[in-house]
Image (spheres, coloured by chain):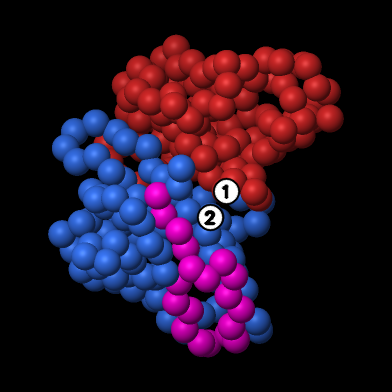
Amino acid sequence: DAGVIQSPRHEVTEMGQEVTLRCKPISGHNSLFWYRQTMMRGLELLIYFNNNVPIDDSGMPEDRFSAKMPNASFSTLKIQPSEPRDSAVYFCASSLGLGELFFGEGSRLTVL
Amino acid sequence: SQQGEEDPQALSIQEGENATMNCSYKTSINNLQWYRQNSGRGLVHLILIRSNEREKHSGRLRVTLDTSKKSSSLLITASRAADTASYFCATALRSGGGADGLTFGKGTHLIIQP
């Protein structure tokens, strides 16, 4: 059974460009989470969805960040325009209820 | 803001020794979970302990939870080189139905010396 699938695994872009990260959760899971990991700040919860509905986006750093979940099998995290301080590893995770989270392998973003 | 804080930040031990990591948190929780992250990879769930449990075992892992002190510990017995990784505690706040985002500490980086 496939786990959480994220793409791209690596993205290098220039400041000001739009970045779109994609996530396919595990089939049957009803919750999806976007996290950002940096050395300085650790793992930060950006936003999570329950049954495709955004529940808490208080972790989204700025209006430049947006996330969508158009259906149960797909989510995107978009940064527009990107800035160097957005460089981080972005993780998507899914779960069923309050149980364990299953993480993807992450998307490493470098903004020059 | 981070709910859990792991201690120590880094730990280096010899293979075969036991490794103990601690986690402190601030508010009441529904459950506490431990995860492992190998370099360059995603996090992998290790064990979940509920607020009404005090101790839980899984293979070489032993987790304790003290809700009065708002702390938890993860013990890895008979460590192996493959246990080298970062270990995170994460807390779930909300009880009842519906999801709640886990909040993670900054992790303990464990190095097992062969």
Q: Counting other residues with Cα less than 10 Å from the Cα at mark 2, is it few (<14), some (14-19), or many (20 or more)?
A: many
- Tell me the CA gap for discs 2 and 1: 5 Å
Q: What is the secondary structure assignment of the residue under circle 1? A: strand
- The amino acid at mark 1 is Gly
Q: Which residue is mark 2?
A: B106
**Residue in view at x 84 percent, y 30 percent:** A112
Residue A45 appears in view: yes
Q: A95 or A28: which is nearer to us?
A: A95
Position of residue A88 measured from the top left corner of the image (x, y, whole percent): 67, 38
**Residue in view at x 65 percent, y 50 percent:** A39
Position of residue A3 measured from the top left corner of the image (x, y, whole percent): 48, 39
Would you say the residues marked 2 and 1 are in contact, meaning their CB atoms lie under 8 Å apart? yes
Label drawn at residue A42: 1
Q: Quadrant of residue A69?
A: top left
Q: Which chain is painted in blue?
A: B
- Magenta segment includes A6: no
Label drawn at residue B31: none
